[in-house]
Amino acid sequence: MLYLWIKVVHLVAVISLIAGLVTMSFGGRLAQPEWRRIARQADYRLASPALIVVWLSGPTLAVMANWWSAPWLMAKLVFVIVVSALHGRLSGTLRRLERDGVTGPSPSLFQRALPITLISMAVIVVLVIVKPF
């Protein structure tokens, strides 16, 4: 029963993280300070806390289910690291833009962030549900 509750927490955190990353990528694209402020709030209030919960609950589930030797989990971890690194890059870039008061065009990172997020999420879902190897 505990496993199922941790799984629920993990899934809610994953959904929150993806929502935060989507908001950060859209907000970061726009040069208006109010949209960048919304993107920063999505990071502080949604994506960052969710990422912490994902990294706490995910390995807990893997230990509980004895999945550490499963090839699909190792492949999934690659994509989880990609999403985590993307979050770090988006967060840092938004902080720098806000600190420097930049109101001009957004870095190309924000253009690439959405497809990277969505493709990674789709691959992770396939790996977890189908467990192809």
Image (cartoon, rainbow, N blue to C red):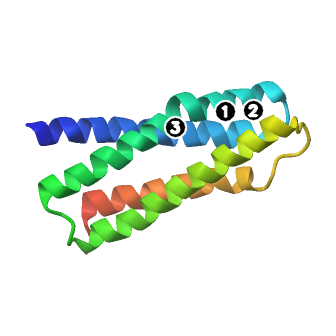
Cα distance between the residues tagged 2 and 1: 6 Å
Closer to the N terminus: mark 1 or mark 3?
1
For residue 60, side relative to residue 24 (left or right): left
What is the CA distance from the residue labelled 3 to the residue labelled 2? 15 Å
Instruction: Identify which residue, 63 or 14, lies in the foreground.
Output: 63
Question: Where does the image place residue 81, in percent across and percent down from the top left?
Answer: 47, 61
Q: Residue at x 45, y 63 (%)?
A: 79
Residue at screen point 52% across, 37% down:
47
Q: Residue 82: x percent and y percent?
A: 51, 61
Q: According to the image, label 2 marks what residue?
A: 36
Using the rendered view, name the quadrant where residue 6 is placed: top left
Label pair 2/1, CB-CB below 8 angstroms: yes
Element class at badge 3: helix
Residue located beneath label 1 in the image:
40
- The residue under label 3 is 47
For the residue marked with disc 3, what is the amino acid?
Answer: Ala
Q: Residue furthest top?
A: 34
Residue placed farthest to the right in the image? 104
Of all residues shown, which one is farthest toward the front?
Answer: 99
Residue 46 visible in this rendered orientation of the protein: yes
Q: Position of residue 12 (x, y in %)?
A: 35, 35
Binning the other alpha carbons within 10 Å of mark 2 as few (below 14), some (14 to 19) or many (20 upward) gives many
